[in-house]
């Protein structure tokens, strides 16, 4: 006789609080969140693309590939928080990333996200213009089987 599914144990069906849903019958819980829209630029703000800024990495989410930088010059950039995407990091690593509280140098550019004009960091590098190399530092701390 072939195998036939006869249901789940009592209390584990239809997403009523146990299993993947995690939020009971109404959904809720940890499920999907709607992303927050970026803050809009003031109408009178004009980004000068050639100006280099310095700042500190506030947060960087390595597996998502984005983060935020707080500029050292307060009030120069609206909201004092700049979005940075992994493609805009000047790095020699296979997977460009930033470390929290690292000092960086960057330029800014106006971009449109979700129909809203905002600023984004570009040409992100170490202070002084050097490429960011985090991979070598982390690899040096690891022990590789059979050598590196």
Image: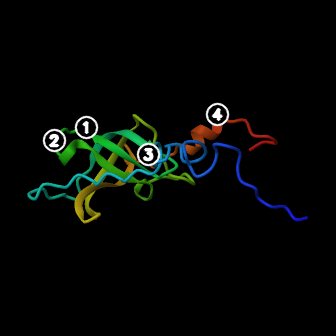
Foreground mark, 2 or 4?
A: 2
Foreground mark, 2 or 3?
A: 3
Viewer can see residue 85: yes
For the image, the number of numbered tags is: 4
**Cβ–Cβ under 8 Å for marks 3 and 1:** no
**Cβ–Cβ under 8 Å for marks 1 and 2:** no
Residue at image mark 2: 75
Judging depth in this view, the residue of 125 and 96 nearest the camera is 96
- Mark 3 and mark 1 lie on one chain; the one further toward the N terminus is 3
- Mark 2 and mark 3 lie on one chain; the one further toward the N terminus is 3
Judging depth in this view, the residue of 14 and 148 nearest the camera is 14
Estimate the x, y position of residue 23 in percent, counting from the top left: 49, 43
| SS of the residue under disc 1 | loop
Residue at image mark 4: 141
Residue at image mark 1: 72
Disc 1 crowd rating (10 Å Cα; few below 14, some 14-19, many 20+) is some
Residue at image mark 3: 28
Estimate the x, y position of residue 42 in percent, counting from the top left: 12, 54
Disc 4 crowd rating (10 Å Cα; few below 14, some 14-19, many 20+) is few
């Amino acid at each position: 006789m072939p195998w036939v599914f006869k249901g789940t144990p009592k209390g584990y069906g239809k997403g009523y609080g146990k299993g993947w849903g995690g939020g009971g019958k109404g959904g809720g819980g940890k499920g999907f969140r709607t992303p927050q829209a970026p803050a809009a630029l003031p109408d009178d703000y004009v980004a000068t693309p050639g100006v280099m800024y310095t700042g500190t990495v506030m947060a960087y989410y390595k597996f998502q590939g984005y983060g935020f930088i707080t500029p050292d010059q307060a009030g120069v950039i609206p909201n004092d928080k700049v979005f940075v995407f992994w493609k805009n990091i000047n790095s020699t690593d296979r997977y460009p990333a930033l470390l929290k509280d690292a000092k960086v140098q960057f330029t800014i550019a106006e971009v449109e996200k979700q129909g809203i004009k905002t600023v984004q960091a570009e040409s992100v590098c170490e202070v002084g213009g050097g490429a960011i190399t985090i991979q070598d530092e982390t690899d040096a701390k690891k022990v590789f089987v059979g050598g590196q």
